[in-house]
Amino acid sequence: MLNSPVVDTFLELVRIDSPSGQEAVLGQAIQNKLSDLGISSSIDAFGNLFAKVEGRGQPVLLSAHLDTVEPGRGVKPTVEGGMIKSDGTTILGADNKAALAAILTAISQADRSKLRPLEIVFSVREETDGWISKFDFSNLTAKTGLIADRASAVGSVVLSSPWIMNLNIAVVGKPAHSSLPELAVNALTVAAKAISATKWGRIDSVTTANLGIVSGGSGMNTIPGRVDLVGEIRSFSETKLNAVQAKIKSVFSQVCSKYGAELIFDNSLYCQGYSYKKSDPAVKQIVSVLQSLNITPFYEVVFGASDANTFAANNFKVVTIGDGCTDPHTVNESISEASLEKLTQVFLAYITNSG
Ligand SMILES: [Zn+2]
């Protein structure tokens, strides 16, 4: 494809290393690009980039993340037959630089007199610990927005993302020499009883529970005094999430007290979920943009989280759409030039939409 500004921008961005926590060089490069477009931007103490663009009508939010996963250093993109890939030793970084390139290109191509007011947030550490949460959301006046961070065809509209709760459980018994079991409370066997008395896996159509790490014990001839368990619950229903947490805690508590062990049960919300309706104005707006470009919209419910969850937790209706990327987080990651063009058209129509 000749003379494709979005492809050129994309190739330039993926060549700039930006693994999570080391996004500063990319942030600066994007500030320079915005500045070339006459847009001033700032970077907060955490590395999140923020810019505002004047316009008419309802303001909209555009967001993407600057960071990439590993192996993501020294990316050497190749373009062949309309497909862009890495050289096979690194990821490509289309997640999420496809969106960054599309947003920058759309703004550069937009008729400024038709532009809506834009509020742009490019976040850091989305892939690790979501530092968008440290962004000062009082900067924003937009209530709705768009994120392209779903590895699906351009046309995908994500309606729901789950609530996720992390579990850190410790069963504390009493250690003793293996020859003196009468003196011990074996934390491992108590934990095993509690684990098998608990329902894991798919709890119902919208809820899962997983125990991911079990650790404990100190020696072959020592009865374990403590076992630590790490897990999570995810659900599209906050009520069900809390009900499963309460159930697990109650089973563990009963088993521990029956066998004389102490239970330490910590749970913390990793992210809030969201569920949009197809009739939601924020969703309808995206769907009408897609249809105006002859892209057939399709709805998805995903079991993963992104910056959109944090926006939702702060009362912003930010809709996630497909970015056209395939095999993200692997060295086989790819995106077509056609998808980059399409994504740019979507952003262009969105930011100049009069609706
Ligand atoms: Zn991403």
Image (tube, grey):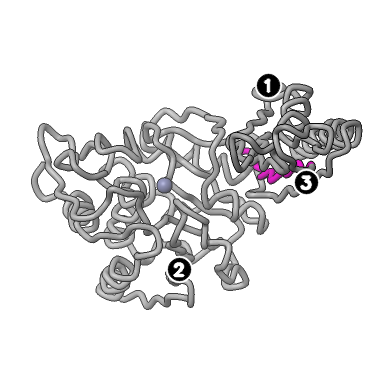
Measure the alpha-carbon separation of dots 1 and 3.
26 Å
Which one is in front, 91 or 109? 91
Q: Is residue 7 left or right of residue 270?
A: left
User: What residue is shown at x 17% (from left), y 38% (from top)?
Assistant: 88
The three-letter amino acid code for the residue at tag 1 is Ser
| Quarter occupied by residue 178 | top right
Q: Is residue 278 left or right of residue 13?
A: right
SS at mark 2 in the image: loop
| Sequence-earlier tag: 1 or 3 | 1
Q: Which residue is mark 3?
A: 265
User: What residue is shown at x 38% (from left), y 50% (from top)?
Assistant: 347
Q: Is residue 328 left or right of residue 276?
A: left
| Sequence-earlier tag: 1 or 2 | 2
- Asked whether residue 341 is in view, the answer is yes
Q: Which residues are magenta?
A: 162-173
SS at mark 3 in the image: strand
| Sequence-earlier tag: 3 or 2 | 2
The three-letter amino acid code for the residue at tag 3 is Phe
SS at mark 1 in the image: loop
Circle 3 or circle 2, nearest the eye: 3
Please check the rendered image and state whether residue 319 is part of the magenta-colored stretch, yes or no: no
Measure the alpha-carbon separation of dots 1 and 2.
36 Å
Q: Which residue is mark 2?
A: 48
Q: Vertical placement of 248 versus 272: above or below?
A: above
- Asked whether residue 278 is in view, the answer is no
Q: Which mark is residue 205?
A: 1
Note whether ligand 1 is within 8 Å of mark 2.
Answer: no
